[in-house]
Every structure is written in C-alpha cells, then in structure tokens.
Amino acid sequence: MALFVVTHQHEEARCPSGDPAKGSMLLRGLSKEGSERFGVTVHAEAMIDGLHTLTMIVEAGDMDKVQEFMAPFAQGGSVAVQPANLCGEIVARGHC
C-alpha cells in the first residue's frame, strides 16, 4: 500500500457544507465504509476554516484508486494527489 497526501479546494459558492444533502454525501464518502469501496484508507482529514480546502492523508494500492475515490470532489473543485512517505522512511533513506 502506498501513502498519499490529497488536497481538494473549491470556491465558496460550490461548498457542499451549505447543502444538507451534499454535506451528508461528502461525509459518507469520507467514512471508512465509503473509502473502502475504492480500496482507500483515510488516515486523517481536516478542513482549513474559511479557505474551503480539505487535506487528507490516505493509503491505497495506487494513485488511480485515490483519483477514482476523489472523482466526486473533482466535480466541485480542484484535486491534487501527491505520493508521500512517513517521516521515518525519509530519515532512514537520508534524503527527501
């Protein structure tokens, strides 16, 4: 399994939290059951207040699984998926 940092950003006018149905759909997608349907494990997720930015640390078999998982988010804004490693792995290699 590979580790990824995912960032999603949307405009205030497209914020799903303002619509109860869309907000519920978003939370179901981020749930353990919702992410596991795509073979993705969400280790952490947080939103930056007022910036409409969601950042997640996820694990999946490959980047394509993460992109598939994030497809609904991409409909409402940008999605960036970046391969990542734990700090201990970077230190053990001796470089970033």
Image (spheres, rainbow, N blue to C red):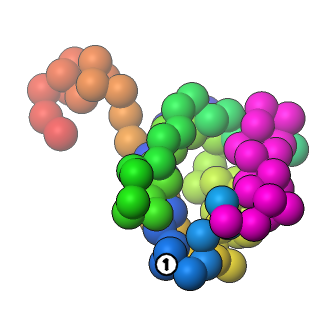
Location of residue 37 with respect to 26 vertically, above or below = above
Q: Magenta includes 21?
A: yes
Which secondary structure class fits the magenta region best?
helix
The picture places residue 95, in percent across and down from the top left corner, at: 13, 34
Q: Quadrant of the C terminus?
A: top left
> In the visual, does 10 lie left or right of 32?
left
Judged from the image, the secondary structure of the residue bearing numbered disc 1 is loop
> In the visual, does 9 lie left or right of 71?
left
Q: Quadrant of the N terminus?
A: top right
Residue 93 shows up from this direction: yes
Which residue carries the number 1 mark? 11
**The disc labelled 1 sits on which kind of residue?**
Glu
Location of residue 84 with respect to 71 vertically, above or below = above
Q: Foreground: 76 or 18?
A: 18
> Residue visible at 13% across and 26% down?
94
> Residue visible at 46% across and 63% down?
52
Q: Residues within 10 Å of mark 1 (few under 14, many from 20)?
A: few
Residue 4 shows up from this direction: no
Q: Foreground: 93 or 71?
A: 71
- The region drawn magenta spans 18-36
Residue 2, quarter of the rendered image: top right
> Residue visible at 39% across and 50% down?
48
The picture places residue 22, in percent across and down from the top left corner, at: 79, 64
> In the visual, does 89 lie left or right of 74?
left
> Residue visible at 67% across and 34% down?
41
Q: How many marks?
A: 1
Looking at the image, the residue that sits furthest to the left is: 94
